[in-house]
Amino acid sequence: MKDDDQNLPSSANQGPSQSEKSDENTSLVDELGIQDIYEPMAGLDGKIFCTAGRDAPVAEFNEDYLILHPPQLPLYEQGPEEEIVVSVDERGIVLDELGVAKKIPTAKYQGFPIYYFGEQKEGTLKHYAAVLTADERLVFIFDDKGERLTTDDVYKLRNKSVNGEISQFPGLSCIIDDTSVEDERVDPDAMVNTDITQ
């Protein structure tokens, strides 16, 4: 048997050549050398991975988030990515999936609706909130530190209010405060006289 092996070409004794290996797509668990669940952590190209076994998804630990990879596919440095596009109208208001201006339901400032503005707070995915006035101007709402409110801030305030009106909270300011009329939810002149004495 040994004599037959010695008569074979040298490439046959070594198994697949390097070019054949590079053509094959090795799975990520094989690239990481994962055999069972007893050694769940592995490293590759300076990255840290963890899995619960050969058939479980492989988690890649990134600085800010976690990426899950299918175990049976190779690790691609540049894989398909989802591109998130935010559509805005000519006024700068974010449009929803149906192309309708996106506003915060029931939230209002001085009676005016509050919309998602196209600009996001730096370093976050939070949109700034903007009030759409009667003359179709967009104006921002500011807190007591002079910073613009985000839509998250407006949702929190709206949920604390009784009727969605957030201008009642102290420390908020907006350019329409100077020109807005007083709250007319209760008009004393329109009240019915309930005095029963004659």
Image (cartoon, rainbow, N blue to C red):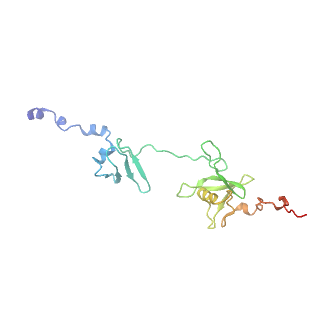
Q: Is residue 142 above or below residue 132?
A: below
Left or right for 98, reference 49: right
Q: Is residue 55 above or below residue 6?
A: below
Q: Nearer the viewer, residue 25 or 50?
A: 50
Give the total number of marks visible in the rendering: 0
Coordinates of residue 163 in the picture (x, y in percent): 68, 57
The residue depicted at 35 percent of the width and 44 percent of the height is 71
Left or right for 105, reference 83: right
Q: Nearer the viewer, residue 109 or 63?
A: 109
Coordinates of residue 159 in the picture (x, y in percent): 62, 57
The residue depicted at 30 percent of the width and 48 percent of the height is 32
The residue depicted at 30 percent of the width and 49 percent of the height is 37
Q: Is residue 152 above or below residue 54?
A: below
Q: Quadrant of the N terminus?
A: top left
Q: Nearer the viewer, residue 57 or 100?
A: 57
Q: Quadrant of the C terminus?
A: bottom right
Residue 188 falls in image quadrant: bottom right
